[in-house]
Image (cartoon, grey):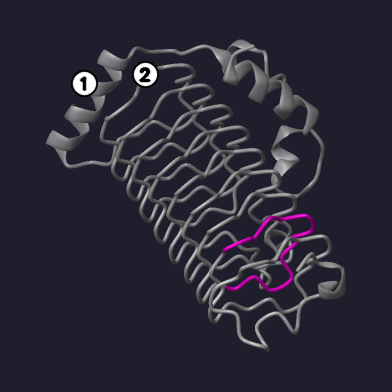
Amino acid sequence: MTRLATALALACALAQPLAAQSMMSGVAMDSPAMTEAETTREALSARLDAARREGTPPALARMRLNGLDLSGLDFTGADMKGARLNGADLSGAVLDGARLDQAWAVGATFDGASLRGASLFQSQLVGASLKGADLTAARAPANFTDADLTGAIFAGADLGADTKNQSMGLMRGDLSGATARGADFSGANLLRVVLEFADLREATFDGANLATAEMAGADLRGASIAGAKFDAADLASARLTDLKGEATSTLAAARNLDRALR
């Protein structure tokens, strides 16, 4: 089974009205809209070039780009809201400032891509690969369930819930089961973010806000947590050995600290 097929199967299994997964409810992941492309790499590249010449943001909202090789293309500032990118290869692509809200990128590859300042509100990246991707200062309350975020950069990124907006307060980043070993979350907003059973070994959380984060079963061995906030974060069964930058008070406000593995 290919990675996309595996990710699509997982996405179907997660199709329930819960937080970041709510978009998946009732969606036919094997439909043409989720598996086929309406254009080619060559035609899309020409469209991007034309937009740059005209000085306008590329308009790609809701386009079906599933399975295409889009590696290395420049999508800077593009409007890709609701775009279908399932299984697409965006390795090394530039998506700085791009709008990917509610985009579908199940099983897609963003290895080494630049998404600095991009918006990924409610984006579906189940089983996607973002190894070494740069999401500095991105707004990313997205579904990263089982994604590979090894070495990804989320410095100053906002994956947290908007507690000032009641309806938006339910939307937060979901990294359940994700691999984020060595990832950089320094200064990131991870308020209420789901990190259950995520591999966070050697990750950096210096100055990050992890208040009320759901971290049960997460592996934080060797992680750096200097100045991080863990107020009411659930650490039941989390692995906390060899932490760096830990002060006596750093984890004191967390929940279930007595049930963590230290």
Residue 81 position in % (x across, y down): 48, 38
Which residue: 66% across, 73% down? 164
Question: Alpha-carbon neighbours of circle 2 within 10 Å: few (<14), some, or many (≥20)?
Answer: some
Which residue: 57% across, 14% down? 35
Residue 60 position in % (x across, y down): 39, 31
Three-letter residue code for mark 2: Asp
Q: Could one spot residue 6 in this view of the protein?
A: yes
Q: Is 214 placed left or right of 41 in the picture?
A: right
Q: Which secondary structure lies at badge 2?
A: loop
Between 40 and 181, the residue placed more toward the observer is 181
Q: Is 214 placed left or right of 173 in the picture?
A: right
* Residues drawn in magenta: 209-222
Residue 244 within the magenta-colored segment of the rendering? no
Q: Is 212 placed left or right of 58 in the picture?
A: right
Q: In the rendered image, which quarter is residue 49 located in?
A: top left
Residue 34 position in % (x across, y down): 59, 19
Q: Which mark is residue 46?
A: 1
Between 42 and 178, the residue placed more toward the observer is 178
Q: Which secondary structure lies at badge 1?
A: helix
Three-letter residue code for mark 1: Ala
The residue labelled by disc 2 is 69
Between 47 and 201, the residue placed more toward the observer is 201
Residue 9 position in % (x across, y down): 72, 21
Mark nearest the camera among 2 and 1 is: 2
